[in-house]
Amino acid sequence: MIDSFVERLPRGMQQFVNEIVLERYPEPARPFNKETATVVEALEDPRFIFRSAKGIAEQISLAPGQVWEILESKDLEGVLVHSRSRNAFTTRDHYRQTAGWYNRMLDSFAGHIR
């Protein structure tokens, strides 16, 4: 759906959307340990776009402190998207798939995503 919309944009805007908004940070390969993989699965739950550390901890039965350690670890560097305005997390792929193009563009302009 997004691809058909992007195709109708002027060429300069297509390049902006594809390179800046959708492909800003490439997602690396993910050979994670078991706990990190479980957190990533919870982050990619289709019922949510963003997840709080507390919500993840409740879903996967880990202590919130452990979830925070995993979220702040180098293992998820380049994989994680942090919404500063919501203090919540998701993966880059999940964000691209679930957040609408308009929200991704607004988040990018406003600096809400890092």
Image (spheres, rainbow, N blue to C red):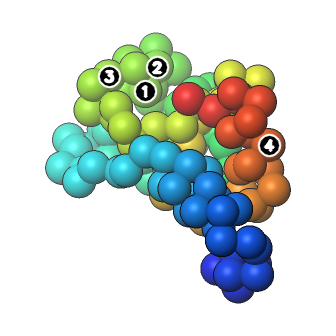
Left or right for 7, reference 32: right
Q: Nearer the viewer, mark 3 or mark 4?
A: 4
Q: Is residue 89 above or below residue 84?
A: below
In this rendered view, identify the residue nearer to me: 31 or 83: 83
Mark identifier at residue 106: 4
Element on which disc 1 rests: helix
Asked if residue 43 shows in the view, the reply is no
Q: How many marks?
A: 4
Residue shown at 27%/25% (left/top)? 74
Residue corresponding to mark 3:
73
Element on which disc 3 rests: loop
Q: If you read the primary sequence from the N terminus, does the residue marked by circle 2 or circle 3 appear first?
A: 2
Alpha carbon of mark 4 to alpha carbon of mark 2: how far? 27 Å
Alpha carbon of mark 3 to alpha carbon of mark 4: how far? 27 Å
Residue shown at 74%/36% (left/top)? 109
Determine contact: label 1, label 2, CB under 8 Å: yes
Determine contact: label 3, label 4, CB under 8 Å: no
Residue corresponding to mark 2:
68
Q: Is residue 78 above or below residue 16?
A: above
Determine contact: label 1, label 3, CB under 8 Å: yes
In the picture, the quarter occupied by the N terminus is bottom right
Residue corresponding to mark 1:
71
Mark identifier at residue 5: none
Alpha carbon of mark 1 to alpha carbon of mark 2: how far? 5 Å
Q: Amino acid at mark 1?
A: Leu
Left or right for 1, reference 36: right
Q: Amino acid at mark 4?
A: Leu
Q: Position of residue 60 (x, y in %)?
A: 48, 41
Element on which disc 4 rests: helix
